[in-house]
Amino acid sequence: MQRAIALVLEYLESRAPVFTRLLRYHSKIIHPTNIAGVEIFSRNTRWHEPKYKESFVKLALADDVAFREEFAPEIIPISILATKDYEIHGHIKAPIIASSGLALSYIPLARLSLTDSYPLPFFRTRNISGTIIFIPNIENYFHLMVDYLLPPICAIMREPHRYGHITFVMQRHFPMVELFGQLLNDLGISTSIHPIGKFDRLKGGVLLFGGSEPRDSGAAFAYPDEMRAIGNLADKYLSASKPPSRVFVTRSKAQRRRITNEIELRDVLERYGFKTVELRFGNPLEQIALFRNAEIIMSVHGASLTNLIWAKTARVIELFPSNLRPKHYLNIAAQMGLEYQPIIGSEGDNREDFIIDIEEIERALSR
């Protein structure tokens, strides 16, 4: 039924866009680099460097064979757009280019899904001023940070006097965004939070929107210099109590990608001085403190490892089922200059749960 509704709406959007705009349905996507005035710069990945090569090859799947053979530096294009030609609708997970009715997105698709953009004809228009950073209602912490928050924040870090007052427009409450607002305030950049309800339409001011476009989606993070500066700003807010130096991030209460023999693993890690933690994303300072000065961080592949952006000198041990080996956190570790080691377990089941080789863990910790 949902697919049938989507097809009808897509047809109407193509043939009768005036009607679908009355319904506030905007699904067709325009890429930011197709808009006049977009600024583009680039960064290099670091996972081609000798100390990361073995890890890259270990994680590479069949589609990486050609790249493994070349193993050359990869340039990551990053684009930043500042535009007044926009609207933000509270029920659509992307800004809308007002003049065309197209959704502004880096997603490599033709349209937003029906769940990300659905008809909602009633609205109230609100005007806003200053520079706008839009944070949609998303569930994944990696995408919140890397796709939506860091690109505009890092643009502001590079040119702190260019953008004036910053307003974070948020479809849901994110404590990490509030913390970033405070860190910008510490730089002398005024900020505010503007919650948006699903019946609201915002316009006015300048929308600051950006993102990276690597060949491999695992290399989306490309802001190491800015994150080191932001991390230094965050230091003064961290508790005086000393966090553990060896951290194991558990996924035991997650719905998927759990370690089947985690109890046995924890027994071993306890002998090596590890503390098992379950991250609570409602407390950003707790997350930062755990990663900031850690000696070793071990975790199954998952969004918690996005917090490597805060780490200074940690050794990272990432655990994988053999049939799921993304390189997102290898890239972050490499960009931040951290030591990195992947350990591959058994094949994951239909929930991606898997068994890890305890002897291999002990060998890694003994070296």
Image (spheres, rainbow, N blue to C red):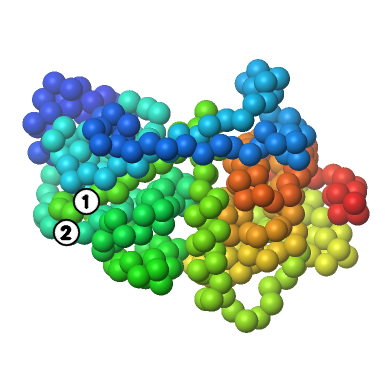
Q: Is residue 278 above or below residue 97?
A: below
Q: Residue at x 36, y 59 (%)?
A: 160
Label 1 residue SS: strand
| Nearest to the observer: residue 112 or residue 128 | 128
- Picture coordinates of residue 98 (x, y %)? 15, 39
> Which residue is located at x 37 percent, y 27 percent?
109
Task: Count every numbered label the image shows and give the total.
Answer: 2
Which residue lies under the disc numbered 2? 128
Is the residue under label 2 in contact with that under label 1 (CB below 8 Å)? no
Q: Nearer the viewer, mark 1 or mark 2?
A: 1
Compare residues 233 and 136 and report the one nearer the observer.
Answer: 233
Q: Is residue 120 left or right of residue 267?
A: left
Please name the amino acid that badge 1 sits on: Val
Query: In the rendered image, which quarter is residue 257 located in?
Result: top right
In depth, the one of 261 and 274 nearer the eye is 274
**How busy is the neighbourhood of tag 1: few (under 14 within 10 Å), some, or many (20 plus)?**
many
The secondary structure type at the circle numbered 2 is: loop
Note whether residue 196 is visible: no
| Spot occupied by residue 271 in the image (x, y as percentages of width and height) | 88, 65
Q: Is residue 244 above or below residue 15?
A: below
The CA span between labels 1 and 2 is 9 Å
| Quarter of the image that includes the N terminus | top left
Q: Residue furthest bottom?
A: 240
Residue 110: x and y in percent read 33, 26
Tag shown at residue 206: 1
Q: Is residue 95 visible?
A: yes
Residue 154: image location, x then y, percent? 43, 52
Classify mark 2: residues with Cα within 10 Å, few (<14), some (14-19) or many (20+).
some
**Quadrant position of residue 286:** bottom right
At label 2, the amino acid type is Ile
